[in-house]
Image (spheres, helix red, strand yellow):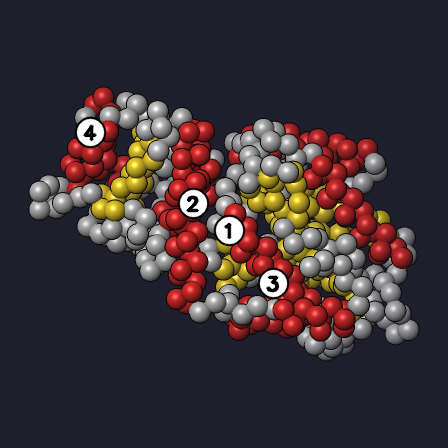
Amino acid sequence: MRLVVLSISLFFSFSMSILAQALPERERAQKVDAILKQRFESVMPMIMERAGIDMWVLITREYNEDPVVRTMLPATWLNARRRTILVFSRNPETNEVERMAVARYNFGENIQSVWDKEQQPNQWQALAELIEARDPQSIGINFSEDYGIADGITKTDYEGLMNALPSKYKERIVSAEPLAVGWIETRTELEMEIFEKLVATTHEVIAEAFSNAVITPGETTTEDVVWFLRQKVTDLGYDTWFHPTVDIQRTDEELESHITAFSNTPDGKVIQPGDLLHCDFGISYLRLNTDCQQHAYVLKEGETEAPQFLVDAFAKGNRVQDIFTANFETGKSGNEILLESLTEAKAEGLRPSIYTHPLGLYGHSAGPTIGMWDAQEGVPGSGDYLLYENTAYAIELNTTVTIPEWNKDIRIMLEEAGFWGPEGFRYVNERQEKLILID
C-alpha cells in the first residue's frame, strides 16, 4: 500500500477498510513463540559466530528483568521467575548453539531447564559446574557503557556469578555487548512480515487522526488529536510505546525549539485553517515498535491544495531522506553515515538535522546511533557501532526551510520505518511524500 495522500477523504475510506484489529491473546502468544523459535534457531548462532564469544550467560530476577531477557520471555511468561539464568553455549566447530536454563522451570518450549535442585541445591554452583563442563574460552555477560539495553546484569547477580566461578573462568569474562545489540537489532523474516503490517496500521491511524473525522478546524485542539491517537490504539488492541505529540507551525508564531515543539501544553492549541500540523506517534505490538512523524495541512476556505511554498518545503524533507538513506552501507559506522549525509545535504543548500535510531524490539533500540538532535557532530560509542544487514531504523530527521510568505523558518520533521538488508535500503511501508490535506 502506497501512502501518498492525494485526497484525505479517499484515503480515509480506503484505510478504514483495511485497518486491522489486533489478534486475540491466544493467537498473539502463538505468534510470539513462533518468532522466538525462529530467532533462537537463526539469529543466535549468527551473532555468536560474528562476536566470537563461546558462551553467553544472562542472569535476571522476577520484576527486575534484564532488557535482553525480557525480549526472550516465552509468551506466557509476563515476567521472569525467581532467579532465571540462561546459558547459550556455542560449539566453534559446528556453530551449533546449545540453549539451557539454570532455573527451576523450562524457559517455555525453546529452552529446557538443566538444573536439578535436588542434586545440586545451590543455583550458583550449578551454573559454575555447567560452565566448567563446557569449558568456554570466552564468557559474555551483559555489561555495557554505551547501551543501557546491553547493561542488564545487576550488582547482586554479578557478585553471585563471580563468587561461584573458579579463577580461570573469571579471567574469561567479557562484555556481551555485541551479542546483546546483535540480538536486539536483527530482524527475521517473520518479524518483518508483522512489522510491515504494523507500520501500515501506524500510517492508517495517523490518516484518520489528520482528517475531518477527528479534526474540526476552529474547535479541535492538538491535545484532542493526541488523545484520539492513544484511544484508537487501545480500541484496536495495540499499545503505544510513547505518549504522542501533535504540534502546529503557523504564520504568526515563531519556530519553536526542538524541546518546546515536543512538549504539549495541558490543553493544547486550537487547530485553525492554514496550520501546518505535525505528529510523532508509535505503536507497540507483538514485541515490535513503530515510530512515525508526518505532516498535514489544514486548507483555508477556497483552497483545494496546500500552498506551493509548503509543498516545496516538504519536498526538501524528502530530499534529505534520499541523501541520508543513499549513504547506508554495511560496515559503515553510524557516525560515518551521519557526517557524510550532513555534508552532502548542506552542499545542496539544505539545512538538515539527522537523529536516526534503531527500531524493533524497543523503540529507541540498540544498534548504530546515527546522530542525535543535540549531537550533530556524531555520538561516541553507539555512533561508532557498524551497520549490519537485516536491521530496522526510524529514519528520523528534519530540515529547516525559510518561508518568505510567512516571514519565518519552518521545520519539516519526518520519521519513517526503514529496513537495511541484503538488497539495500527500503521503507518498511513506503513514506509520506505529500502533505495530508484536511478540509
Circle nearer the viewer, 3 or 2: 2
Q: Residue at x 23, y 35 (%)?
A: 161
Q: Which residue is mark 3?
A: 201
Quote the CA–CA distance across marks 1 and 3. 15 Å
Q: Quadrant of residue 122?
A: top left
Q: Secondary structure at mark 3?
A: helix
Three-letter code for the amino acid on which mark 2 is drawn: Arg
Judging depth in this view, the residue of 91 and 274 nearest the camera is: 91
Q: CA distance from mark 3 to mark 2?
A: 24 Å
The residue that mark 4 highlights is: 133
Lateral position of residue 307 relative to residue 262, left or right = right
Identify residue type, mark 4: Ala
Q: Amino acid at mark 1?
A: Glu
Of all residues, the one furthest to the front in this rendering is 94
Q: Secondary structure at mark 4?
A: helix
Q: CA distance from mark 2 to mark 1?
A: 9 Å
Quarter containing the C terminus: bottom right
